[in-house]
Image (tube, helix red, strand yellow):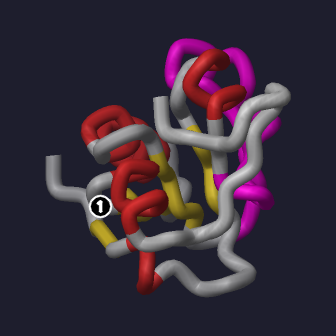
Amino acid sequence: MNVAEVSVNDIPEDAPLVDVREDAEWQAGHAPNAVHVPMSQLPARLEDIPDDAPLYIICKVGGRSAQVAAWLNSMGREAVNVADGMASWADAGKPMVSETEHPPFVA
């Protein structure tokens, strides 16, 4: 699986970010402008993924997002894996929001 990869600091500011973590992970904390399409729902929700190219795919540490990026690339979409995922996003101090009353964190 050869997938282009980028660090969180090299994602263009207006780039489409697709978060493929599961619901509980998303609710705990995510990037403010990310689109949430859990990996487990991806084939059924392909139409929910932006048409922009390239897409930046993120998960918790980069494993699931690499698989999703490879799959999207095989489907003719241009997708890039975000190295080290939301763990790296949080470590870099990037903005995060939560879907709960608690401060955002990476679950």
Relative to 12, residue 2 above or below: above
Query: Which residue is at a point 59% across and 85% down the rendered structure image?
Result: 12
Classify residue 1 as left or right of residue 106: left
Q: Position of residue 77 (x, y in %)?
A: 54, 56
* Residue at the image position 58 percent from the left and 63 percent from the top: 55
Indicate the quadrant where residue 16 lies: bottom right
In the rendered structure, does residue 37 fall within the stretch colored magenta?
yes
Q: Based on the picture, tell me whether residue 61 belongs to the magenta stretch.
A: no
- Between 66 and 53, the residue placed more toward the observer is 66
Q: Name the side, left or right, on which 27 lies relative to 10.
A: right
Quadrant in the picture for residue 63: top left
Estimate the x, y position of residue 65 in percent, counting from the top left: 39, 42
Tell me the kind of residue under disc 1.
Ala
SS type, badge 1: loop
Magenta segment: 31-52
Q: In the image, 71: left or right of 34?
A: left
Query: Which residue is at 70% across, 41% downward?
Result: 103
Q: How many other residues sit within 10 Å of disc 1, few (<14), some (14-19) or many (≥20)?
A: many
Say which residue label 1 marks. 83
Q: Position of residue 4 (x, y in %)?
A: 28, 68
Which quadrant holds residue 32? bottom right
Q: Nearer the viewer, residue 39 or 7?
A: 7
Vertical order, 35 against 9 (above or below): above
Image height of 69 relative to 37, above or below: below
Residue drawn at the location 71% of the way across and 27% of the way down: 27
Q: Is residue 72 above or below residue 34?
A: above
